[in-house]
Image (cartoon, rainbow, N blue to C red):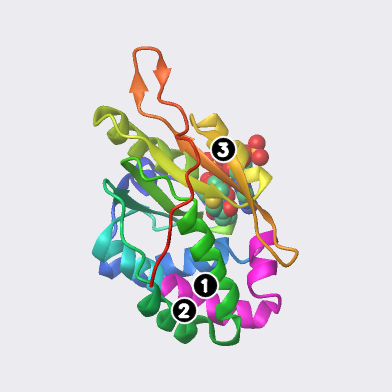
């Protein structure tokens, strides 16, 4: 398949992109140590991931920014975190039980651990970056990242994300992120690398903020 510049032009996604982009998210995240840990059965994973990313996509449209490419083969979901957000535990717990059924406890644990170690300094949070598995390794993920990084640099804002394996960690290191303290998920879970891309300064980028686990209530 030939790729044109229009195919790779980054734009904001809308509700009309839901079908293809939820498919890209569910397919791209289907394999890997985090997926194996969350939903070990691959058939159940397909069902649960479709529901999970349907929720994540709509949450992104409503509360954040969802970016895609002209050909809808990639998606990035960013959430501006310009001030700390309160933990909304009871509603989220119920939503995760609806989405993941018997697998909900691990999703709850994952989100709670991510939340506890989330930096409170103002930044944009890259919740998900996914490229259609048939189109990976052609620079599409890098193009989506670079597009928003340009905007963040112009506005003097850092970025934060959790990398779920060594390979995507490498991609982020190449794009100006540094790795902070890791998270090791319990019950034989995988390692997660917390990554920070500081705001530009005259002397490089602002450093990874010190790890201060957030208190949760509710
Ligand atoms: C990670 C991902 C978004 C990168 O997009 P891409 O268009 O494939 O990447 P690019 O061509 O711009 O850059 C290539 C780099 O991406 C990373 N990458 C590529 N395929 C990957 C995959 N299946 N899993 C993890 N990282 C991958 C690697 O760092 C690769 O460089 P390398 O060949 O030196 O290892 C995409 O591969 C993907 O959707 N992977 C599965 C989901 C995922 O891991 N998302 C990130 C969550 S933190």
SS at circle 2:
helix
| Above or below, comparing residue 77 to residue 207 in the picture | below
**Image side of residue 67 versus residue 207, left or right:** left
Q: Position of residue 175 (x, y in %)?
A: 49, 32
The yes-or-no answer for disc 2 within 8 Å of ligand 1 is no
Say few, some or many: other residues with alpha carbon within 10 Å of mark 2 (under 14 / 14 to 19 / 20 or more): many
Measured Cα–Cα span from mark 3 to mark 2: 28 Å
Q: Which of marks 3 and 2 is nearer the N terminus?
A: 2
Q: Which of marks 3 and 1 is nearer the N terminus?
A: 1
Identify which residue is drawn at 39% across, 48% down.
125
Q: Is residue 171 visible?
A: yes
Residue of label 3: 180
| Above or below, comparing residue 36 to residue 70 in the picture | below
Measured Cα–Cα span from mark 3 to mark 1: 23 Å
Most extreme residue toward the right is 188
In depth, the one of 20 and 4 nearer the eye is 20
Identify which residue is drawn at 45% across, 58% down.
115
Q: Does the magenta stretch include residue 50?
A: yes
Q: Earlier in the sequence, mark 2 or mark 1?
A: 2
Residue of label 2: 96
Q: Where is residue 8 in the image (x, y as percent from the top left)?
A: 39, 45
| Residue bounds of the magenta highlight | 31-54
The quadrant in which residue 35 appears is bottom right
Circle 2/circle 1 CB separation < 8 Å: yes
Q: Is residue 138 visible?
A: no
The quadrant in which residue 43 appears is bottom right
């Amino acid at each position: 398949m030939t790729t044109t510049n229009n195919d790779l032009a980054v734009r904001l996604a809308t509700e009309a992109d839901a079908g293809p982009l939820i498919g890209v998210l569910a397919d791209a995240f289907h394999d890997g140590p985090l997926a194996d840990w969350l939903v070990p059965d691959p058939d159940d994973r397909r069902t649960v991931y479709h529901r999970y990313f349907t929720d994540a996509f709509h949450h992104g449209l409503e509360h954040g920014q969802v970016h895609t490419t002209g050909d809808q083969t990639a998606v990035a979901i960013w959430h501006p975190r310009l001030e700390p957000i309160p933990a909304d535990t009871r509603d989220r717990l119920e939503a995760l039980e609806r989405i993941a059924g018997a697998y909900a406890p691990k999703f709850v644990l994952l989100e709670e651990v991510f939340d506890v170690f989330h930096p409170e300094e103002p930044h944009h949070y890259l919740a998900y970056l996914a490229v259609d598995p048939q189109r990976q390794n052609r620079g599409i993920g890098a193009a989506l990242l670079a597009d928003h990084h340009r905007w963040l640099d112009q506005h003097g804002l850092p970025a934060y994300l959790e990398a779920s394996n060594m390979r995507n960690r490498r991609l982020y290191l190449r794009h100006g992120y540094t790795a902070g303290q890791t998270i090791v998920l319990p019950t034989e879970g995988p390692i997660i690398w917390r990554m920070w891309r500081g705001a530009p300064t005259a002397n490089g980028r602002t450093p990874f903020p010190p790890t201060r686990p957030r208190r949760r209530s509710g």
